[in-house]
Amino acid sequence: MRVIPILFLLVSVSFSDTSTQTDWSGGGGVPGPVTDWGNSYDVVDLINDTGSSLCLASAEYTVDDSCDGARSAYAADIDGDGDTDILGAASDANDISWWENTDGTGTEWTEHLVDGDFPFACSVYPTDVDGDGDIDVLGAAYSADNISWWENSDTSPGVFLTEHLVEDDFYSVCWVYAADVDGDGDTDVLGAALNGNKISWWENTDGSGTSWIEHSVDGSFDGARSVYATDVDGDGDTDILGAAVLADDITWWENTDGTGTEWTEHLVDGDFDGAYSVYAADVDGDGNIDVLGAADNADMITWWNLTSFSPSGALESSILDAGWVDFWELFASNEQEPTGTSVGFQFRSSNDPSSMGAWSDTVFTANTDLSGILADSTDLVQYRVILQTTDPSVTPVLNDVTISYTIEVSIGDTNLEEISSWDLAPAANPSLSSFAVQVSVPQSVMVDLLLYDVTGRVIAQHSQELPGGEHSVSFNNLHEGVYFCTMRAGDFTATERIVVLK
């Protein structure tokens, strides 16, 4: 808020105003300008949902929060660029998709559709089906009783144009997997049929993925929901594990002769109530195992970083429109800083929200003098808080911040001769860049002056006892717009609408 004194100066007064933020739980995505920080902010990186502390262990990262009927998720380098991508099945959308790990850190994802018409897509698995060295996509369509695989283009990695059918009559197939079951060096396919109560595997007869022979592992596995393959007993061949959602069973079948033609069942748990889909891989490339999951009701595919933590995070506030600021005074913060942690701040100000300029150097003091950091006569301000820790078990916590600034109001005399009426009148309307109002009082009286913008926000106010006569109040360097100036003196009240042009 800015008022510049005119000729015949009677008095020039300054007063401080403040803006405070104590809550960040409203979340991000509010760039501003705002007239009150409220409980929101603009952007955040590695700071939790409350906006006041770091993400420690088990940081959660959303890949896609609109994966309609998310059923299954796996991780593999689909496009062959050296990082880990994610493959998923969405039953309600009838989609098989993969998400490209855009920057290799697991924080930015680009979705690519493999098949948008795969009825009740419920399971996916990435594997090299045809033995050409790239990752193909294997999928199960529950409603169509189909198991198919899509061939990864040799010339455009990550593009899937050709679908190959493995099986078209596997009743309510809900899970697929791939492994070399018979030990002949190529990729075979495994499946679980929920209503068919079956666990089967299909032999890749010539290794190209174009000819298949089904072999039954168990034809009475009640509510077969999931299938997986690995060497359980350490004898060098591939065994098969399964989950039966209706039988509540976790079971593994021993590949007795190593060729996948004879199986011996071993019960792991006969009272394990309902299982769907999980997988593990190093998504963010930090050498640690992360966990992936699919949530049907929440329509989400998510990965969790279980072993690392965020040593540093930042939050940028919404841009605050403080009105007319003559100069910025102080930025005060209240925080908790356990040993090994720190809280730092950066600042910037401007009169143009689209060009806020560079951030200041980071300061680590709870009370910061802004006079040498922010330019005078800039009305928009933004802060960035940086939280840091060297200990994965503790985080600093930001409790509140307050910024203070100075507003100056100047009033001058134009005529102190006796007058008989009360009045508030603009000197010119509309005005260019500034305006002046004439305040007339017939006697000495306490006068309140308030200046509002079109939203009803008070952007300047001043109370002072004025002697009888005419007085001029000038407001310079105004933003273009419509303003309302209200005068209150005793029982007299008047409001004038003023238009300011640039």
Image (cartoon, rainbow, N blue to C red):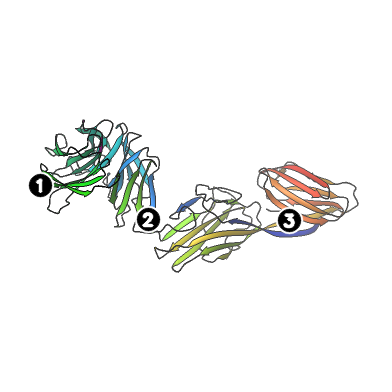
The residue stretch that appears in magenta: 168-174
Residue 218 coordinates in the image, percent (x, y): 17, 40
User: What type is the residue that disc 3 sits on?
Assistant: Val
Residue 348 coordinates in the image, percent (x, y): 55, 56
Asked if residue 361 shows in the view, the reply is no
Please determine whether, in this image, residue 203 is positioned above or below residue 464: above
Q: Which residue is mark 1?
A: 258
- What kind of element bears circle 2? loop
Q: Earlier in the sequence, mark 2 or mark 1?
A: 2
Image quadrant occupied by the C terminus: top right
Cα gap from disc 2 to disc 3, whole angstroms = 53 Å
Q: Which residue is mark 2?
A: 58
Q: Magenta includes 170?
A: yes
Please determine whether, in this image, residue 491 is positioned above or below residue 146: below
Q: Which residue is mark 3?
A: 409
User: 267 or 356, which lies in front?
Assistant: 267
Asked whether disc 1 touches disc 3, contact meaning CB atoms under 8 Å apart, the reply is no
Front disc: 1 or 3: 1
- Residue 270 shown left or right of residue 446 in the figure: left
Q: Earlier in the sequence, mark 2 or mark 3?
A: 2
Furthest residue in direction left, as rendered? 257
